[in-house]
């Protein structure tokens, strides 16, 4: 039996509620650790979708992943990667990251960067394993963040 295929597509206005729900489900486990909602839980998804910054991953027609990415003065930035907890291990997160890398290349970038909260220790193990290199730690927007960059 083959696994269903994860499809990544640009988010539409009518995806805003599903995208927010997916991000909330993915990040709610961190609230007790951080002491407040992580930044992705506070994003205005309708506005970010209107600015063409949001992509969703679908599995059998259901929104099960969210990618928020855009260009900044520092390069191509992955703001959020979220996969619904019930899909862990199905390749949703990986599909979103592969898509982000392809998008960065298509826009002419030789690298991309992201950050994670210093309390999200799992990410600090995961990102280096897939080629991201830590380059900074700093407080930003009231959160202690760890910054990573990956050369493409």
Image (spheres, rainbow, N blue to C red):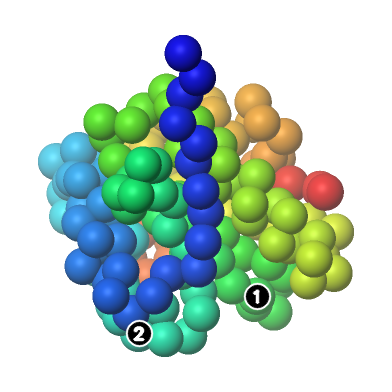
Camera sees residue 85: yes
Residue drawn 51% across the image and 61% down it: 9
Residue drawn 14% across the image and 41% down it: 32
What secondary structure is marked by label 2? helix
Q: Residues within 10 Å of mark 2 (few under 14, many from 20)?
A: few
Instruction: Give 53 or 115, whichever is nearer the viewer.
Output: 53
Instruction: Give 59 or 44, whichever is nearer the viewer.
Output: 59
Q: Residue 6, percent across and down?
A: 49, 41
Q: Residues within 10 Å of mark 1 (few under 14, many from 20)?
A: some
Find residue 12 and report its image quarter: bottom left
Q: Residue furthest front?
A: 1
Residue drawn 33% across the image and 31% down it: 87
Q: Residue 47, percent across and down?
A: 35, 85
Q: Which residue was labeled with disc 2? A: 47
Q: Residue 88, percent across and down?
A: 36, 28
Tally of numbered tags: 2
Q: Which residue was labeled with disc 1? A: 71
Residue 118 vs 99, above or below: the answer is above
Residue drawn 42% across the image and 69% down it: 11
- Mark 2 or mark 1, earlier in chain: 2
Camera sees residue 147: no
Relative side of 108 to 57, left or right = right
């Amino acid at each position: 039996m083959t696994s269903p295929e994860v499809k990544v597509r640009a988010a539409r206005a009518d995806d805003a509620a599903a995208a927010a729900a997916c991000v909330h489900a993915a990040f709610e486990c961190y609230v007790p650790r951080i002491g407040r909602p992580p930044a992705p839980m506070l994003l205005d998804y309708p506005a970010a979708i209107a600015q063409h910054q949001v992509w969703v991953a679908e599995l059998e027609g259901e929104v099960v992943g969210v990618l928020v990415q855009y260009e900044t003065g520092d390069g191509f930035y992955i703001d959020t990667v979220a996969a619904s907890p019930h899909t862990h291990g199905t390749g949703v997160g990986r599909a979103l990251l592969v898509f982000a890398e392809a998008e960065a290349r298509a826009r002419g970038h030789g690298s991309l960067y992201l950050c994670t909260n210093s309390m999200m220790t799992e990410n600090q193990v995961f990102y280096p394993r897939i080629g991201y290199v830590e380059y900074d730690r700093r407080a930003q927007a009231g959160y202690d963040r760890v910054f990573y960059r990956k050369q493409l």
